[in-house]
Amino acid sequence: MKLSRRGVIQAAAALSAVQVLGCASSPKAGPSAGDDKGTAPGKPLNILILGGTRFLGPALVQVAQARGHTLTLFNRGKSNPGLFPDVEKLQGDRDPNKGEGLKALAGRKWDAVIDTSGYVPRIVKASAELLAPNVGQYVFISSVSVYKEMTKKNLNESDAVGTIPDETTEDVGETSYGPLKALCEQAAEAALPGRALNIRPGLIVGPDDGSDRFTYWPLRVAKGGEVLAPGDGEDPVQVIDARDLAAFIIRNVERRTMGIFNVTGPVQPMKIKGMLEDIRTATGSDARFTWVDAAFLEQQKVTAFGDMPAWVPRTGPESGIGDVSIARAVQAGLATRPLVDTVRDTLTWFRALPPDRQEKLRSGLSAEREKEVLAAWHQTKGTAKAG
């Protein structure tokens, strides 16, 4: 079964994060899985964030502030401009050829820069080269989608990354997203040799995720009744709460860690059955799961990762995406909160959104389509065991 959204594992296809991440509400702090209370060891740092007002960005700001660091945000000032009134904001454009470009950054010094919004190598190269003389570390938020052999189990940081024939393309799509992210990593490393930290997240989830790529499941399970569940329950699943990802990044900025890290979760391996059962526990739902095999779902044109968010069948061209090695990140201090906490916080956030937004989920099956597929499954296979 081919994924419908391979290029959107990290930030939902950079079809320019604006379309996919949607509108963020005021950020939710929540407890962190890591030890992020109090000030950080050593002197407070001055940290520049390219972006900073959507999803992962606010989580980074909150963790950094809680640990005593000083933040500067650089962006176009169009998304959630009212966030963090106490934080310095610089306006410009990632593209040096648009408007004032990167001029607001010229001559300024920071201990580290975190690039949350880079998708095109030319643009990452421009910011990295400009900042190289004036920052100690360049942190680039990449994606596990960079890997070439997506069928491989236990993908690790030494595995080959994907390539594209035209490395100058700026058309970010399903086939180019991963290779372009890999080229962005290389651009950062080339501009700051030995001073780049490349973070490859998996599916980022939690409060403020405007893509609904995980939110679909807590909402659907909370409704109860018969729930269409993909596969046989044994497929591995990996997700990372944005707040845990932010904690890992900030703590490794403090440590001046360099190199490449896959950063997803949970730390203890999880299968789709365990994920849905944890969601049922967190919501107190009476949901009954009917497991529908991948071949039947493909026949019904129900897509992995899109119609069935977070799920990837363990066979097929994308099977490795749910089984990425995070051993290196765990050694560097990665900690992940219980999934039930992420579920509860995500539901609290979503239920506070305007009613018209709650009615328009951006991922997952509609109620009508779910009923159709379940009816077809029962008709073909007889009454399936739900549990």
Image (spheres, helix red, strand yellow):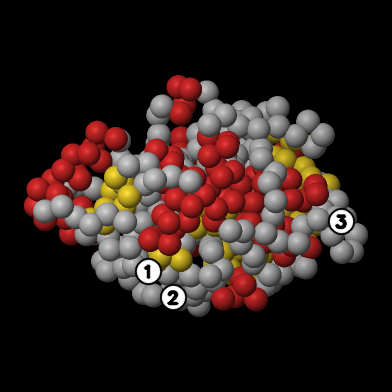
Mark 1 vs 2: CB contact within 8 A: yes
Q: With 315 as the anchor, is 100 left or right in this view?
A: right
- Give the CA separation, mark 1 to mark 2: 7 Å
**Mark positioned earlier in the residue sequence (1 or 3):** 3
Which is more N-terminal, label 2 or label 3?
3
Cα–Cα span, label 1 and label 3: 38 Å
Residue 157's spot in the image, x, y percent? 52, 74
Whether residue 23 is visible to the viewer of this picture, yes or no, is no
Q: In this rendering, is residue 19 above or below 145?
A: above
Amino acid residing under circle 3: Thr
Residue 71 image-quadrant placement: top right
- Residue displayed at 68% across by 28% down: 81
Q: Residues within 10 Å of mark 1 (few under 14, many from 20)?
A: many
Q: Position of residue 227 (x, y in %)?
A: 31, 46
Task: Report the disc number at residue 257.
Answer: none
At label 2, the amino acid type is Asn
Identity, as a three-letter code, of the amino acid under mark 1? Gly
Q: Is residue 272 above or below residue 341?
A: below
* Residue that numbered label 1 is attached to: 320
For the C terminus, give its image quadrant. bottom left
Q: Nearer the viewer, residue 196 or 35?
A: 35
Crowd tier of the residue under label 3, counting other residues whose Cα lies within 10 Å: few below 14, some 14–19, many 20 or above:
some
Camera sees residue 384: yes
Q: Find disc 3 in the rendering and name its residue.
A: 39
